[in-house]
Amino acid sequence: MTEVLFYITEQAGTGVRDALAWRIAEKAWRQGRQIYVHCQDETHAQALDQQFWAQPASGFLPHSLLGEGPAPVVLGFGDDPGSHHDVLINLAAAVPDFVTRFERAAEMITGDPRQREGGRERFRFYRERGFPLKTHNL
């Protein structure tokens, strides 16, 4: 069954979740994992693509948008990504239907009150369905 990891930070503001997603994706990539980053919509996926290219000079994260070709990290939205990935990083507001296809799923919760409430709803969703849950306070 998919293990769900909640990463919780008190930081709030635009881009906090995306920055956390980059950190988690980089760590998983360095461990040899295939990662799918599930974005809210196409605009978010394209913006995240640009942000991932602009990360610090000390970091590098080979990635692509879904449908652009293979990469260890794939950014997409909407439907099931179709190909094999080990880790799902969910940046959408809801839990995607295909979450059970992944070995692990990561949820980022920030100090923004709306993000907190959404995180609580997703936590309840996973708990009620018996997913193994872990939390990491950052």
Image: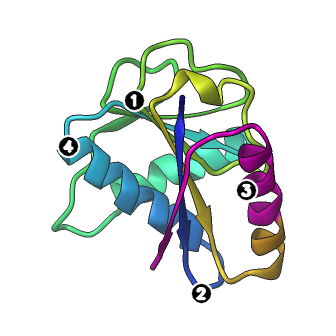
Which residue corresponds to mark 4? 31
Q: Amino acid at mark 3?
A: Phe
**Vertical comparison of 66 with 36: above or below:** above
**Vertical comparison of 132 with 84: above or below:** below
Which residue corresponds to mark 3? 123
Residue 10 marker = 2
Quadrant of the rendering where the N terminus is positioned: top right
31 or 49, nearer to the observer: 31
Pointer 2 or 4: first along the chain: 2
Local SS, label 4: loop
Q: Position of residue 134 (x, y in %)?
A: 51, 58
Pointer 1 or 3: first along the chain: 1
Residue shown at 19% from the left, 46% from the top:
30
Is residue 76 part of the magenta span, yes or no?
Answer: no
Quarter occupied by residue 35:
top left
Pointer 1 or 4: first along the chain: 4
The magenta stretch spans which residues?
Answer: 118-138
Local SS, label 2: loop
Q: Farthest residue toward the top?
A: 82
Pointer 2 or 3: first along the chain: 2
